Amino acid sequence: MSTGREGFAEPHQSRREGVPQAGDVGKDQPSRFSDAPVAYIISAGLLGSAFVALLWVPSYAHLTPALVGIPFFYWYSLLWLVINSGCQLVAYQLLVAGPRRRRMRATSGTSGTRQPGSQP
Amino acid sequence: MTLDGVALAVFITLFALVTVIGFTAGRWRRTAPLNTLDQWALGGRSFGGFVTWFLLGGDLYTAYTFIAVPGAMYALGAVSGWFAVAYTILVWPIVFVLMPRLWSVSHKHGFVTPADFVRGRFGSRGLGLAIAFTGLLALMPYIALQLVGIQSVLQVMGLGNGASGFEQDLPLIIAFVILAAFTYTSGLRAPALIAFVKDFLVYLVVIVAVIYIPIRLGGYGQIFSAVEAHANAAAATALAKHTTSTFALLPSAKSYWAYATLALGSAMALFMYPHSVTGVLASRQRETIRRNTVALPLYSLMLAFIALLGFMAIAAGIHTTNSRLAAPLLFRAMFPSWFAGVAYAAVAIGALVPAAIMSIAAANLFTRNIYREFIRPSAKPSEEAQVSKIASLVVKFGALAFVLGINTQNAINLQLLGGIWILQTFPSIGIGLFTRSLHRWGLILGWLAGMVYGTYEAYGVSTATVPHFAGSIATIPVIGQTGYIALTALALNLIVTIVVTIILRLSPGTVGTDVTAPGDYVVDLPDTTLAPLLELAGTEEGARG
């Protein structure tokens, strides 16, 4: 991969957060914390919940209540597998899919999709 | 064990099929010759959501899943076995947070390995070398674990029980030569394509196993009753001998810390491995990874069911002193020969895919971060690809020697041992993705402290039969509980890193140059500077074709 090495020589200046840059329009720029603090805080709580639940071992290292003969410890772990997957789905909607839909609505009819050849 | 002809015939047929796929995979989705690292090692960075899901799954669910975890459940129970379920749940939120940033910055700057990123981020060749060295070291026992997985099914099929040492190892060596050859010719496309076959076989075997075996054993209630009786008997025997039982149905007050630290440490370690990063970087778009983390827990569910095979082996009255044979012996006892053959093939192919990806990742590390950085800085892309191919062979044969040379009964420990080392790269990679406020020399010294402490502690773990490296948990200083050595070493690593950082902040001239900009961590495909990729940029759904 020869082209990528250009990055090492490039001088850089930090791009200012939230300020649209030339060429930014219409691409999937994921949202940043400052754009949607509530979404970030809710997502952090959702993603963190599985850590609290599963690492707090004394809270679930019990035999009962058993579910169809499976001790609590085992089925409760699997329950968190499902809950965590749901949490990630909600976080994905909040942080990625939702903002993308809003951007699409905001830019539809103005700039449209970028042409492949338009790279600087 | 006696030779099972039918099972062996089925096994060889499926293995031959995979071999053909492996050799023809080089032509799949090919847009350029395979003589650059991007093409050989990252499949042209062109994989969409569907392929990435298979590739990451194929990457992460390995012989660890099929051999080591059921073996640990069979021999030791909840703490050393079931923690893997908590671990494979917790890994996905971590991926969700870290990996999109790594994808973006890697695409922007053409990073292929985690060491590339660290070198660019902190402007330190030494730190890059430390990260590359750790990756190579940690991958060796992990690749060896895959070989142990293949060896286990071959052994249960009745192969490799010959009198001489060479006769015993010949089938394993043949399987391995095939793996090495198709990885050499086809690169990452081979395991990516074989992952489809692997997943089909694995799902088939797992679904049949978790429905059919419990029916034969009288249901999950019966299985857990049998395990409870087994645990009580083990405790009674141990009491009579004035020792404590090593088998546990539930974590006890003494092992809460061990369970939690094994789960957390393993989860934090997994995506520091170079091969996991390879799987991430081969995807075509930033959000492919994040969206996949919603569906990837399906693999975790599968892992949980496979873990329970260890308990089913107890309930089925399987007796072996070699715990890594528990799952294959259960298949042999429960399934008709032809389906046992399918199950063995699923395990063996399930080990081949990650072994191929791991050896490609290890080879990349060597080429990019050691060969080009320190030996031949002027290497051309085609030369890099050639060196990587050869390095992938060397790494694989190194791992093979590892398996043939050491005691591999406690197979899960091979993975945990790698975890101790690779977790010491977390401050540079995981924290480095968000901030470069840690000083590069602090990171090097912290890494050194963590590596030395972790290795020393692991070396000191012994059992009656194994003098060194017998396990990966030890007493945590200060807290006084037993826990996973990897996390204790990481804590020491962070303390050293932070203290050195605070001291060196007094002389700001020593901070290296950062080639990355804050915006680089959030770019998605249309903003990358990789011109050839623009031709591949289409809708996500296009990847399914």
Image (cartoon, coloured by chain):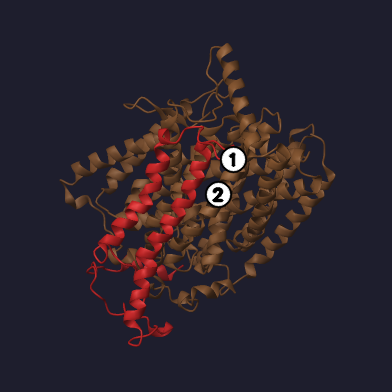
Chain colours: A red, B brown
Query: Where, by quadrant of the figure, is residue B448 drawn?
Result: top left
The amino acid marked with disc number 2 is Leu
**Residues at discs 2 and 1 in contact (Cβ within 8 Å):** no
Q: Which residue is mark 1?
A: A68
SS at circle 2: helix
Residue A50 position within the rendered picture, expressed as x and y whole percent measured from the top left: 41, 47
Instruction: Kindly give the residue lying farthest to the left in the view shown.
Output: B506
Which residue is drawn at the image coordinates 39% and 44% (left, top)? A51
Seen from the viewer's position, the closer of residues B164 and B384 is B164
Q: Say which residue appears at 65% left-offset and 56% top-offset.
A: B198
Mark 1 element type: loop
Residue type for callout 1 = Val
Q: Is residue B2 above or below residue A78?
A: above
Q: Is residue B191 above or below residue B261?
A: below
Above or below — where is A111 with respect to B70? below
Rounded to the nearest whole Å, what is the CA distance between mark 2 and mark 1?
18 Å
Answer yes or no: are tags 2 and 1 on the same subunit. no
Spot occupied by residue B328 in the image (x, y as percentages of width and height) = 70, 40
**Residue designated by label 2:** B301
Dot 2: within a 10 Å radius of its alpha carbon, few (fewer than 14), some, or many (20 or more) residues?
A: some
